[in-house]
Image (spheres, grey):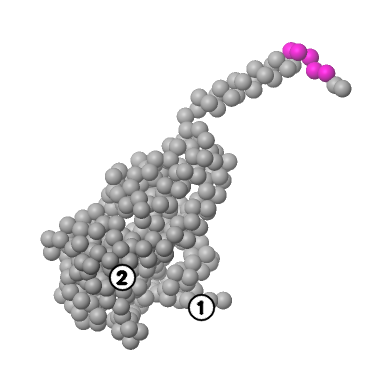
Amino acid sequence: MPTFPFKTLFCAAVFSFAGSLYAADEAPITIKFAHVVAEHTPKGQGAVLFKKLAEERLPGRVKVEVYPNSSLFGDGKEMEALLLGDVQMLAPSLAKFEHYAKAVQVFDLPFLFDDMAAVDRFQAGPQGKALLTSMEGKGITGLAYWHNGLKVLSANKPLREPRDARGLKFRVQASAVLDEQFKALRAAPRKMSFAEVYQGLQTGVVNGTENTWSNYFSQKIHEVQPYFTESNHGLIDYMVITNTTFWQGLPEDVRTELNKVMGEVTLEVNRQAKALNDEARGAIAKAGTSEIIELTPAQREEWRKAMQPVWKKFEGEIGSEVIEAAVNANKAS
């Protein structure tokens, strides 16, 4: 049996102890993850789960701080904060990226996707994956797509046909496509941050909006909107993003593990999104403050035709090949 001199063992122990001391003394990497919605929405739950798993898998090396409900940065400031390094992760609505990559506007086109399965197919395909890395030249790296769900309309009057929306003021996110969507209905779009929507509807600054059931319920929009139209006309999904310089500067093993965690969280967020929206719809119906209008197939087709010109208007910016890939995703293979 081989033997080792005491001096060799002692030196090895000293170096090992010194290395462990260095690792223990090294401050954990802090990741500030900010978002603008409530914790019990799909995005909110995803951020909490990411924190839990990241800190479990990388104990002492990574610390994740979650700031929900615009508590750190609101709609108008969060992208600037990411680029300045004041926050390391965001999950903005896909409507927020038109100034960084025009092709991402594809997700705002009305009546583009038949259902969430089609969205999954597009995002998992080559065109969808390419959009995640399309902004790296501007300092933004996309890590994943998180679902919320399909949008429905709300208003202070019943919306059954496109002409019912004429003259109404609708809150929209800062998106040229969404502006044109409501202009196609001869309605007036009004850009407004998410945190201001309740008050805007309550005071009549705007007459209606579009969102998912979970976002409506979490912000108590049903208290100030007597009518919801289940149009399912558009998508509210999020792209989880990080500062490119920050991400590329992480130790390789940390970055690899965080990518694995993000993949697991994404599967769970997307699994839960439908359940959370169904639950929120049920809660709004039970509250009895609003009427939920279900469109007939013929009525829905009228809405689709009214908004269809928006596709053509943005085809040059988005790219016909991207739109074609999204349309083809409606066909299950």
Looking at the rendered structure, the secondary structure element under dot 1 is loop
Q: Earlier in the sequence, mark 1 or mark 2?
A: 2
Please, which residue is most extreme toward the left here?
203
Of the pair 82 and 4, the residue shown nearer to us: 4
Q: Is residue 181 above or below residue 83?
A: below
Disc 1 to disc 2, how far (Cα)? 23 Å
Name the residue that disc number 2 marks. 152
Of the pair 162 and 95, the residue shown nearer to us: 162
Predominant secondary structure, magenta span: loop
> Residue 124: where, in percent of width, then height?
52, 64
**Numbered tag placed on residue 321 in the rendering:** none
Span of residues in magenta: 3-7
> Residue 328: where, in percent of width, then height?
49, 76
> Residue 141: where, in percent of width, then height?
45, 52
Q: How many marks?
A: 2
Residue 244, visible in the rendered structure:
no
| In-image side of 38 versus 123 (left or right) | left
Please, which residue is most extreme toward the bottom here?
298
| Residue drawn at (60%, 20%) of the image | 18
> Mark 1 is on which residue type?
Lys
Residue 158, image quadrant: bottom left
Q: Is residue 286 above or below residue 57?
A: below
| Residue drawn at (31%, 60%) of the image | 215
> Mark 2 is on which residue type?
Val
Name the residue that disc number 1 marks. 331
Please rate how many residues cluster around mark 1, counting C-alpha atoms within 10 Å: few if below 14, some from 14 to 19, many from 20. few
| In-image side of 264 versus 303 (left or right) | right
Looking at the rendered structure, the secondary structure element under dot 2 is strand
| Residue drawn at (38%, 72%) of the image | 316
Q: Is residue 62 above or below residue 46?
A: above
